[in-house]
Image (tube, coloured by chain):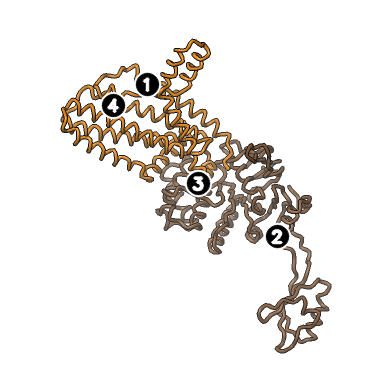
Amino acid sequence: MSTPAIEIQGLTKDYAVGFWRKQMRRSLDNLTLQVQEGEAFGFLGPNGAGKTTTLKILMSLIFPTAGTARVRGRSIDDVRMHREIGYLPEQPYFYDYLTARELLDYYARFFGYPAAERRQRVALFLERVGLASAGNVQLRKFSKGMLQRVGIAQAIVHDPQVIFLDEPMSGLDPVGRREVRNIILDLKRQGRTVFFSTHILSDAEMLCDRVAVLVGGKLQGVGAPGEIVSMEVYAMEIFFEMRSGRPLPGALAAHATKMGERFRVEVPEAQLYPTLEQLRGCEARILSVAPLRPTLEDYFLKLVARDKANSLPAEVGSAR
Amino acid sequence: MSTIPGVVAINTFREAVRDRVLYNLIFFALMMIGASILVGEISIGISRLVIINLGLSAISIFGLVMAIFIGVGLVHKEIEKRTLYTLLSKPVKRWEFLVGKFGGLLLTLTVNTALMTIGLGAALYYVSRSFLRTDASILVAVYFILLELGLVTALALFFSCFSSPMLSTLFTLGLYVAGIFSTDIRDIGMLTRSPATQAAARAIYYLLPNFHNFNAITAAAHGESIPVSLIWQNTAYAASYVVLVLAAASAVFSGRDLK
């Protein structure tokens, strides 16, 4: 079996808190997971779940209390590991006195490229993130979306195999989010491993081969978005319109929600046909009938609620 | 030899230049012009003494202010603005970052000092219309100031690895002042009869950076020659002390969580 791209074993991080720093607060609790080469892996969790802590440990910005991690077979303590990875921190900030071109050139220097190659690379990656025309603008004049893109460019300027992105879509407008999504899809097409943390679940559902859900520092589940969320239908959703002047049937009136001219009602699957019969009886016009399945978001919210209630970890999905 | 500290150093220098740090040269230039015009009224011998004293003292003070105030922010700013996060995700070891930062500020201070020395030379030529053979001592005094600035920068960097800029400034300034009087501390200890106090004073003397020996301003102003042995001794002392302080800074910084 090939070496996993990322291998995390029992990673734990405690922080000393309080004035005398005698109390310990566990920010990450015995995290174990593997990410295979070429996977787009979503690391999900609400704010304070331990996502950034995990990424910071992997980047050796902070040190674990317990546990180990390897990237492409190399320990995270080995500085050579950093030649094979790229990293975009959350809400990145760069030297604002530099231009985008100078910044990328600065970072490329750490990989020992000769000047001509650096120039080529910088131009190529500026183009790739859509900043070719802003290459000579100082970063202090960049918008948040542009900074995010320059952040991605610095993370991939040396063609790393594994790319870590911390909340890459956070704070971006819809256009910016789509651009970042396209960059991630491009990287995935090129066979790179992309490990990104997010709390925007639709992005994870759209981009990821697998996701891990972290709540309160604990891993709650790992798997493909379809695996992790039950595909079972929990209700049926009906949209309909009433002919003018006709009242809603009494049983539906209590449950239906008016949305402009339309009504929406959610009924258990077993009640679908009786409800449709009722609607036909009062000459309603059926617009759509759709099954409702739990989304990743529902799953996620359920876990957060359960964590708040201090319950046991979920038994959903399996850590590989 | 790794080139990574060099890359960091060049960027640190570029940052200082773009942050208009070298604008202090304008104040220095104005001061030297003013002083030259004022001392033009007095005899040549005295005016040379005044210009050299004033010029070298200004070079030292301007350099010290820069070394301390920029030095204490070197690491803190990178952590605060999180620029260090991306930097350390590259194949950069923490000690390489620190050495690079030190090198970058030292380069800035060297360029600043060199330009101020040229200004001092111009003022000196303006008041006396000639250079004397003994003026070579001025260059030695400037070199000693640079060694001193290197040491102060290393100390500021060390403190900034674990404390806030304000505390680091206080610690560095405190150590600088104590370092100027380190010889006096030893001598006062020797005046006591207690062997323990004598040993403690001696220990403090050896532990504190000895800034006293770097002061050659008076000698340069009076045209006295500075022994070559002192140049070697100060160079070796400053280099060893800087290496030790940077090693300690690296040890502290390498184990620190960057929150």
Chain letter for the part of the structure drawn in orange: B
Badge 3 marks a residue whose secondary structure is loop
Q: Residues within 10 Å of mark 3 (few under 14, many from 20)?
A: few
Chain letter for the part of the structure drawn in brown: A
Give residue B240's position: percent from left, percent from top: 45, 23
B22 shown above or below B176: below
Q: CA distance from mark 4 to mark 1?
A: 16 Å
The residue beneath circle 2 is A296
Q: Is residue A22 rendered to the left or right of residue A312?
A: left
Q: CA distance from mark 4 to mark 2?
A: 71 Å
The residue beneath circle 1 is B213
**Label 4: chain?**
B
Disc nearer the start of the sequence (3/1): 3
The residue beneath circle 3 is B81
Give residue B212's position: percent from left, percent from top: 38, 22
Q: Residues within 10 Å of mark 2 (few under 14, many from 20)?
A: many
Q: Residues within 10 Å of mark 1 (few under 14, many from 20)?
A: some
